[in-house]
């Protein structure tokens, strides 16, 4: 059975160490209904749980035919269990039927309607690595041992490859390297290895916005229609959206524009051909999922659009703005959208959910939502600058990004989300592509920051939260 294509950068959500994410609860609720209607052999009821994207792929008649002829003969869904919930989006459930085991993949759209609904044969997961993966962790101190306990859980999985962890605590920095920068080489990733950082890029876009706000070039309350072509601004649905709504994910825009998949030339590199013209084409006729300012709904499109507006305001490319305003002043000389031939050998190989090689992503107009590549050393500088800003213009922009702008279900400033671990609040953002995962969090009062970078699809959130939970009580 076909399903709507799911393309998401890692969605940042408030979390605690042990709590199930809000999004996972939503998916679980839909799956519970799917199981109920499946066991009642009610194909129409299942179809009515689906959203527009799903229904565009398959009609109710075709779905009912598949359900009656192929799915319902499997018998009742008996025991079910969640296998994984990847990128805060796609859930995989193991389902026992009368005579077979299958895995069902489910995701929901922003209206909590079925977007992906796929049945596949169940295969037992590949055994975790038995030999201890190489590391630079000396295991001398209590901190070393605590970090290793958490890191081992991640790096010993069959589908992970390399891991870099950096911790700033009480003014001291510790760095830990695990695994390989490329499978089979035996070469550890190092603090100067380039990784895709995915949606952590959004915090750079937020800082650019704050900079131009402080410079008097834009206002957070500016309607986006001020900066759009007349042919796009005429869409009445866009009238209430402000620049603030774009950066704190309350615009009501979808996460990924519907026309992206129509012009995708490579499903493993989905954003590279999505241009400004295609974005404007979508915005001309789009409808919002909610009224601007009222509901949090993570939107890659929204932040990509914001970056495009800032390029219009500044007359500079996204990479130029990032370099001139943020990275060069902070001495972050290894953070960029593009890597020249001298830098590219330092870029790690990337691996998919099965631990197989995949492509790093390229971006066009949506670059401000996830295009940057960086190193552990650079992101530790970035974390330090956010944790202890100075008095200069960049520091004032950074401080503005920390001001909370929305606090319903999710607590968010400009780009930066917050999470709670052991009762302690952290600013954080994570990032993910099809072959990389990243996490950055900090708390200035406790004087601690953590950066976790991986060249695999497996989320690093549990690593970061697990280490913080052990180091700060």
Image: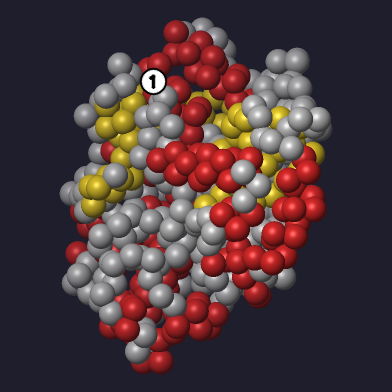
Q: Residue furthest bottom?
A: 231
Q: Quadrant of residue 103?
A: top right
Q: Which quadrant of the structure image shows residue 76? A: top right
Across and down, in percent, residue 124 comes to 77, 27
Which residue corresponds to the image point at 54% horizontal and 67% vertical from the top-left?
A: 52
Q: Which residue is at the front of the view, 228 or 298?
A: 298
* Rendered residue at 28%/83% (across/down): 226
Q: Residues within 10 Å of mark 1 (few under 14, many from 20)?
A: some
Q: Name the residue: 46% across, 8% down.
A: 141
Image side of residue 82 versus residue 96, left or right:
left
Task: Judge by depth and name the residue closer to the eye, 444 or 287.
Answer: 287
Q: Quadrant of the C terminus?
A: top left
Q: Position of residue 231 (x, y in %)?
A: 41, 92
The one nearer the camera, 277 or 450, is 277
Residue at x 50%, y 79% (from the top left corner): 282
Coordinates of residue 170 in the picture (x, y in percent): 30, 22
Q: Quadrant of the N terminus?
A: bottom right
Judge whether 315 appears above or below 143 on screen: below
Tell me if I can see residue 89 in this picture. Answer: yes
121 and 142: which one is in front? 121
Structure colour scheme: secondary structure
* Residue 325 can be seen, yes or no: no
Q: Give how far across and how far down residue 418 sits, in percent.
A: 31, 40
User: Total label count?
Assistant: 1
Residue matched to label 1: 469
In the structure shown, which secondary structural element does the residue marked by tag 1 occupy?
A: helix
Is 388 displayed left or right of 302 in the figure? left
């Amino acid at each position: 059975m076909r399903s709507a294509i799911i393309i998401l950068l890692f969605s940042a959500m408030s979390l605690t160490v042990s709590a199930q994410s809000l999004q996972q609860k939503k998916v679980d609720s839909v799956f519970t209904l799917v199981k109920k209607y499946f066991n009642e052999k009610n194909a129409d009821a299942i179809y009515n749980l689906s959203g527009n994207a799903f229904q565009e792929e398959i009609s109710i008649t075709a779905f009912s035919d598949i359900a009656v002829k192929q799915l319902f003969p499997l018998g009742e869904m008996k025991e079910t269990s969640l296998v994984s919930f990847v990128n805060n989006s796609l859930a995989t459930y193991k389902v026992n039927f009368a005579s077979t085991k299958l895995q069902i993949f489910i995701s929901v759209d922003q209206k909590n309607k079925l977007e992906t609904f796929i049945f596949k044969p169940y295969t037992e997961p590949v055994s975790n690595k038995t030999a201890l993966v190489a590391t630079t962790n000396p295991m001398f101190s209590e901190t070393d041992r605590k970090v290793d306990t958490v890191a081992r859980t991640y790096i010993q999985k069959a589908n992970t490859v390399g891991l870099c962890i950096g911790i700033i605590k009480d003014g001291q920095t510790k760095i830990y390297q695990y695994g390989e920068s490329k499978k089979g080489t035996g070469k550890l990733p190092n603090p100067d290895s380039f990784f895709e950082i995915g949606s952590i890029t959004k915090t750079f876009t937020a800082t650019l916005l704050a900079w131009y706000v402080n410079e008097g070039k834009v206002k957070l309350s500016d309607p986006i229609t001020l900066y759009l072509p007349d042919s796009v601004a005429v869409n009445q649905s866009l009238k209430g959206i402000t620049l603030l709504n774009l950066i704190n994910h309350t615009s009501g825009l979808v996460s990924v524009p519907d026309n992206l998949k129509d012009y995708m030339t490579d499903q493993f590199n989905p954003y590279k051909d999505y241009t400004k013209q295609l974005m404007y084409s979508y915005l001309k006729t789009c409808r919002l999922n909610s009224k601007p300012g009222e509901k949090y709904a993570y939107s890659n499109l929204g932040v990509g659009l914001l970056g495009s507006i800032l390029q219009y305001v500044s007359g500079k490319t996204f990479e130029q703005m990032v370099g001139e305003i943020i990275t060069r002043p902070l001495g972050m000389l290894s953070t960029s959208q593009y890597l020249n031939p001298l830098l590219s050998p330092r870029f790690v190989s990337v691996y998919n959910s099965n631990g197989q090689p995949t492509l790093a992503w390229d971006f066009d107009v949506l670059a401000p939502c996830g295009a940057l590549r960086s190193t552990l050393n650079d992101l530790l500088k970035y974390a330090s600058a956010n944790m202890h800003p100075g008095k200069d213009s960049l520091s004032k922009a950074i401080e503005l990004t920390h001001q909370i702008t929305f606090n319903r279900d999710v607590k968010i400033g400009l780009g930066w989300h917050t999470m709670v671990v052991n009762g302690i609040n952290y600013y954080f953002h994570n990032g993910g592509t099809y072959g990389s995962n990243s996490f950055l969090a900090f708390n200035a009062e406790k004087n601690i920051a953590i950066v976790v970078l991986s060249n695999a699809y497996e989320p690093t959130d549990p690593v970061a939260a697990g280490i913080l939970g052990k180091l700060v009580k």
